[in-house]
Image (cartoon, helix red, strand yellow):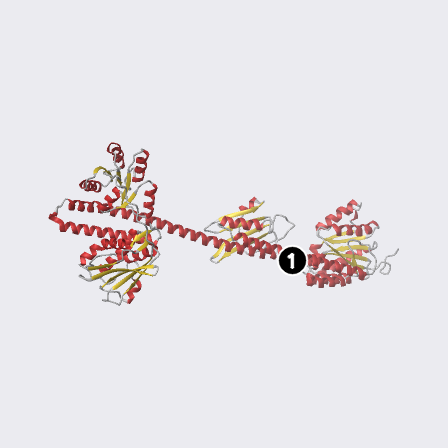
Amino acid sequence: MLVTPETCPARHDVQFHDDDDGADLDASLVAFLSEGLSRGEGALVIARPARWARLAARLAADGLAPPSLAERLVVVDAREVVAPGRSLEAFIAAAVPVLDALAARGPVRAYGEAVDVLLERGRAAEAVRLEALWSQALAGRPVTLRCGYARRRFAGDAGAATFEAVCDAHGDVVVTDDPGATGPPALRRRLARLERDALDLAAERARRRRVEDRLSLLARAADRLDGATDAGAVAEVVLDLAVPALGDVAVLDILPPWDRRFVRGDDAGAAARPLRATDAAADATLRVPLQGPRGQVGALSIHLLDGGRRLDAADQALMGELGGRAAAALEAVRLREEARAAVERQRQAERRRDEFLAMLGHELRNPLAPILTALELMERRAEGSASRERAIIERQARHLARLLDDLLDLSRLERGKLALDLASVSLMAAVERAVALARPSLDRGRHALTVDVPPDLRVRADPERLAQALGQLVANAARYTPDVGHVQVRAAREGDLVRVDVSDDGVGLSPELLQRVFEPFVQGPRALDRPGGGLGVGLAVARSLIALHGGALTATSPGVGGGSTFTVRLPLAEPEAAPPPAPADAPRHRRVLVVDDNVDAADLLGEALRTLGFEVAVAHGAEGALDLAGPFAPDVALVDLGMPGIDGFELAQRLRGRGVELRLVALTGYGQDHDRARTREAGFDAHLVKPAPLDVIVAALAA
């Protein structure tokens, strides 16, 4: 049959397919091409190399090997047709002679997907123009051209408009699942439109599912990162979430102060690749910086090992969100680590201060102890030729001891490390002890002291610390009152409280000084000779001690020259039953072992105790004490703690371990609360702080 436009009119059809690997389209195209080639017709194939390779293999399997069809089969790379800089008109102009040569033998079947390559590259208008050029070129020629498009190129509203334009450029739509389907072309076009809409809906569902998955991932990231305690924990969370949700390999670089790299995935080489914190995206790798408030803290990199998957802008946005949360978590970790380091530095500083203060107290108290013991011994021997000089030495030595105690107590109070031994205490007894402590200041100023304290008032207090606080107030009144002044101590019940007023007719307090009088190291105006001395810490110590007792200390003054009143308020305590009297036959400890590596202190204390009728053995170290303990058989041992070699704690353990039954009294320059707690744990019965008055030592021996 003669082939003419009338007997074989041109056709320009379109076929939409679902996948890139061509499983559905390939079968349809092989049937389309092999039918014509089997009849001796010509064929023109414009396809990607991968698709042509599959088609050629299937044609060969059908007995239509392409090499045997060289004169009737022309194959063109679709990518070359639409390469940048190539003119579509020039391509059509070159294609027309080829079609005419093939048509000289009869009808021609052609397949083209250059238009699909254009859509893939975002050149939709050029794809529609190329279809129009094809329609013009086919006019009057016996050619059936089928153009293939992937349906996913037409997603969204813009894709729908392009879809209609493509359909308008073709005469008919070939149904991929049933290429031979008959019926009105409008029906097949409607079917293709419905398939595109269904694909759009599926894509929208997939997009929403992807958004939900990513929101879920970010929520899990926020929840887990909130509990991250170090950089490693942050990295573990980020990498756990990134692989495989974002990629096959994730690398997290964290900058100093951590300066570490963390890798998750199957690609061991990723750990060695240098990473840059940039925003650049590629198909298989994405990198984003981790930006914290102080700048960049690291970089997150995602790698794909599967060539069939690509990273896109949505992946980059998700990485940015995840990286931002990681940066915030690292910032929180850094702040916590800095806070912990600051706390540790503070703790170390406090520990060093504690050690220094303990050593200071020990080293200053040790020389004071033999000085005061020697003075007491001289007084007991009635060596009256230098009584005035001895009194001066004793007064100044005890003043130095009080200054040292004030400094150490202030430090302990500020750090909350001073504990109280509370009991129901007679306020009168506490005031009498306070007056005794302040007596040197009262006597030096020749002040008249008035005490008015009801004998039945009791408070819940540590007797020593309450006496210390009240003594500070009496001594302060004496120091700031001109000679031959008046100091009053009055107490009364005030509801559920006890009120104690310590008043004087001294220099008074200005309004400015009244506001700061309880601050450490604050003092009123003093002459250059500084009569009475003091460091300005006594009132601070007193207020802190009263506060520890659950009370309050306030000050009032009419002004400079009008005197001052310091008022203590403490909770009232119920009266306690008197303790039962000690048994009449309770033995008194007479044999005393004195142990101290300070030779002067040990020898003078031993001599002083002998003048009181005690039988005394003196050892200048723990080894000597262990040698004497057996033959001397002491009832009580006065033991210094800070001795070289075997210290006082170990000596106590060894004496107890030998079964020696005796009372152990620590006599030491270490006087902090933890020192007292440690002596109790070591088995000591009492803890005295140097320089202890001889009467206090005797009381501890006889207890």
Which quadrant: the N terminus?
Answer: bottom right
Q: At x 38% / y 50%, what residue is drawn?
A: 347
Side of 515 relative to 81 (left or right): left
Q: Between residue 363 and residue 469, name the one nearer to us.
A: 469
Which quadrant of the view contains residue 210? Answer: bottom right
Q: Which residue is mark 1?
A: 208
Q: Is residue 549 visible?
A: yes
Q: Residues within 10 Å of mark 1 (few under 14, many from 20)?
A: few
Q: Is residue 15 above or below residue 384?
A: below
Q: Secondary structure at mark 1?
A: helix
User: Outermost residue toward the right?
Assistant: 1
Count of numbered marks:
1
Q: Quadrant of residue 676?
A: top left
Image position, residue 598 (x, y; %) = 23, 41
Is residue 518 visible in the rendered image? The answer is no
4 sits left or right of 530 in the view: right
Task: List x then y, in percent, for residue 262.
Answer: 52, 47
Give percent across and percent down for residue 548. 34, 55
Q: Tell me the kind of residue under disc 1.
A: Arg
Relative depth, front residue between 86 and 350: 350
Residue 276: where, in percent of width, then height?
52, 53
What residue is drawn where x is 73% and y is 48%?
54
Please state if 673 lies on the left or on the right of 119 as rendered.
Answer: left
